[in-house]
Amino acid sequence: MAEFLQQTLEPELSGFARMGHPLPENVRSVAYEHCKQMGLDSARSWECVQAVAQQLERDQPYEAMAAGMKFLDLTGVYRLFAVLLTA
């Protein structure tokens, strides 16, 4: 149908291809819930997700890791990356 309307549809980004692109709000909300399950309170969870997501959107994974390490341990940061990049 999109071809008929002469529109192109962008494929769904997942994994490392999602870095450097805006992360949708639904992905951020899943990551927020995941941070709460890892033991952060609501405010810290949202702050952590925002800090990491901003760096991933800028395609800066090392800076994103440093931002996440302020809130979580290394395993937690990797889990958060997985949720943000594949949810």
Image (cartoon, helix red, strand yellow):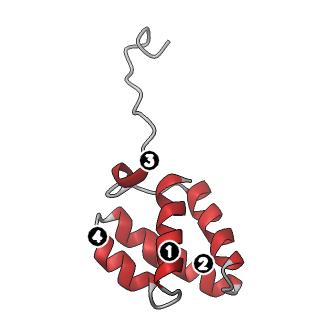
Q: Earlier in the sequence, mark 4 or mark 3?
A: 3
Residue at numbered disc 1:
50
- Asked whether the residues under the numbered discs 1 and 2 touch, taking CB atoms below 8 Å apart as contact, a structural biologist would say yes
What kind of residue is marked 3?
A: Ser
Report which residue position mark 3 lands on.
14
Q: Which residue is mark 4?
A: 60
Q: Residues within 10 Å of mark 2 (few under 14, many from 20)?
A: some
Picture coordinates of residue 25 (x, y %)?
57, 58
| Quadrant of res 57 | bottom left
Q: Which type of secondary structure does the marked residue at label 3 adopt? A: loop
Q: Nearer the viewer, residue 32 or 72?
A: 72
The reply to whether discs 4 and 1 touch (Cβ–Cβ < 8 Å) is: no
Mark 1 to mark 2 CA distance (whole Å): 6 Å
Pointer 2 or 4: first along the chain: 2
Distance between the Cα atoms at labels 4 and 3? Answer: 16 Å
Mark with earlier residue (1, 3)? 3
Q: Amino acid at mark 4?
A: Gln
Q: In this rendering, which labeled residue sits more in front, label 3 or label 2?
A: 3
Residue at label 2? Answer: 46
Mark nearest the camera among 4 and 1 is: 4
Q: Quadrant location of residue 55?
A: bottom left
